[in-house]
Image (tube, rainbow, N blue to C red):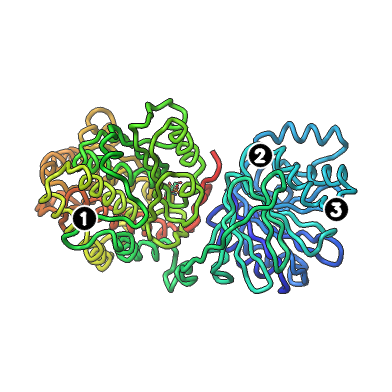
Amino acid sequence: MCGIVGYIGSKKASPILINGLLKLEYRGYDSAGLSTIENNSICVKKNKGRVNNLYDLEGINDLCGTVGIAHTRWATHGKPSKQNSHPHLDNSKTFSVVHNGIIENYHELREFLTKKGYHFLSETDTEVIPNLIHYYFNKNINDSNNFLKAVSLACSDLKGSFAIEVISYLFPNNMIVAKKDSPLVIGVGNNENYIASDIPAILSYSKSFYLLEDGDIALLSKNDVKFYNCSLEELKKEIKNIDWNASSAEKNGYEDYMLKEIHEQPTAIRETIGACLKDNEKVCFDDFNISFKDLSKINKIYIVACGTAMHAGLACKSTFETLCKIDTTVDIASEFRYRNPIINNNTFCIFVSQSGETADTLAALKLAKQHGAKTLAITNVIGSSISREADYNLYTHAGPEIAVASTKAYTSQIVLLTLVAICFAEILNSCSEDILNDLKKELLLIPRKVSSILKNIEPIKDFADSVYKEHDMFFLGRGFDYNVAQEASLKLKEISYIHSDSYAAGELKHGPIALIEKGVTVIGIITDPSLMLKSISNLEEVITRGAKTFIVTNQDIDNSDFNMIYKIPKTNILLSSILSIVPLQLFAYFISKAKGLDVDKPRNLAKSVTVE
Ligand code: M6R
């Protein structure tokens, strides 16, 4: 769960590398480093902490090399320190390597190399890689292809996940990259090539990309890229042109990416609906066609994901059950993959992931395929590992999401899942046309309704400013509102470091109410008219015990016992989560700002969780 960048061309590499790393900091920011080839040797500059610290390193501005690799780290093996920072060198300082992923058999490899006389300077799993390359390089010293051969032999010894970049002063005009279960892309320029963990990091340099598959090894020079499989047979690869706007990956005047991304939700939702939904027509996806024959066999749907993406699944479970009349279970990917779920060829599994790279979700997808399920990936990153693995593939069009706390991806995922549920219901004829037409009509109004919430953020900021020093908060709701409570609670804890919990409001009296005392903040979500009175009475119970209450509702609640009532527009209940989460995303944001925290890069977290 780190970010890697590489450059090979005629320009000074180091500024390009640092610029790329800054865009990848969301993947980890425990340490950063780079190496370039300088006058027949490899120069390494690295340190603990943020990428910006690289600018303070002595000699960083004197680097002139035009070939280089760089890394921003989220520590897995070994504490954040200069010693454990990447790049790592082999003992002879011939090869320099950056690595994203986890080498599961590094103990074995370390032992093997130690017996061969190698020693290790760091606690990382990565340091075995340059030394293994050196070992195989020397073993094949008379082979004309020995650099490539050494890297491929080293890769075949590695168990686990990796995206690596390798340079050597012996081959100053080359770089080798390889990947398995960790993302890597190559951006093609004019007599230059850029490498990164994701497309936005190098989007300002290139719009044409090679997306590497697991097992691929690429040998780069400034004007060529050759691809090989692990047996070093040459492969053909197609270039993909990406039409994302580089400025859409920048802050565009907002103080933080999270705030910008919250405000981008109307556009993200509109783009996700795109051309799939037109007035009075059936939902239709360009690249996803499933027949009545295939769909009518399905008797079980799983929606599998992690974190916020899993919460988007929860928000849509009832939608699938109500519209398609198919039993639907939402599962946490890391649980699903180890609990022997009942899967067969009558099962349809939907995997939801913003990054498309989450290790547990990818493993769960592979498991579902092995057991014969039909699989659909819903991701936000074109060509991501999850999207390439699934039978069917749909994209949310939220644009690059940089802030670690997911916002626009969540609402776009709910929109796309809802469209899939409508599409299935239309194919199966499992729901009345009137219900579906009303839902589709409402869906088209959602972007405008989100915009109207975004025009009224002051009251949310005021309430956040009045409670930001608290240590515990509780989110309560019933039905769809409980799902939103779960997402709102996650949002708050990840960026404000305030302990928070979410409960189905009816569960309160079965235990959690013991935690309510004078001054505790309780946030209630009430959007389902049929459950309104029950939710109000649960909230009255916490008021009686001294809680401060903030209510997000689309109902006309006239109750002066609540400290604050924030009104959102009414909509179809199946879509209510998309509207009710928005003020709560802002609530978490303003609390984090009031506490003076780094909203976009919360401690201990990374945007893309490519390790288990
Ligand atoms: O990229 P993914 O959607 O697969 O990521 C899943 C979770 O790691 C992610 O949603 C995480 O929970 C976010 N930090 C929440 O804001």
Query: What residue is pinned by disc 3?
Result: 144
State the separation of the CA atoms marked 2 and 3: 28 Å
Callout 3, which amino acid? Ser
- Name above or below for residue 467 compared with residue 221: above
The answer to which of 530 and 466 lies nearer the viewer is 530
Q: Nearer the viewer, residue 425 or 6?
A: 425
Is the residue under label 2 in contact with that under label 1 (CB below 8 Å)?
no
Ranked by sequence position, the earlier of labels 1 and 3 is: 3
Count of marks placed on residues: 3
Numbered tag placed on residue 469 in the rendering? none
Quick check: can you spot residue 519? no
Q: Nearer the viewer, mark 2 or mark 3?
A: 3
Question: Which is more toward the observer, 53 or 85?
Answer: 85
Secondary structure type for disc 1: loop
Q: Amino acid at mark 1?
A: Lys
Residue nearest the observer in this picture, 372 or 398:
372
The residue singled out by tag 2 in the image is: 103
Residue identifier under label 1: 282
Earlier sequence position, callout 2 versus callout 3: 2
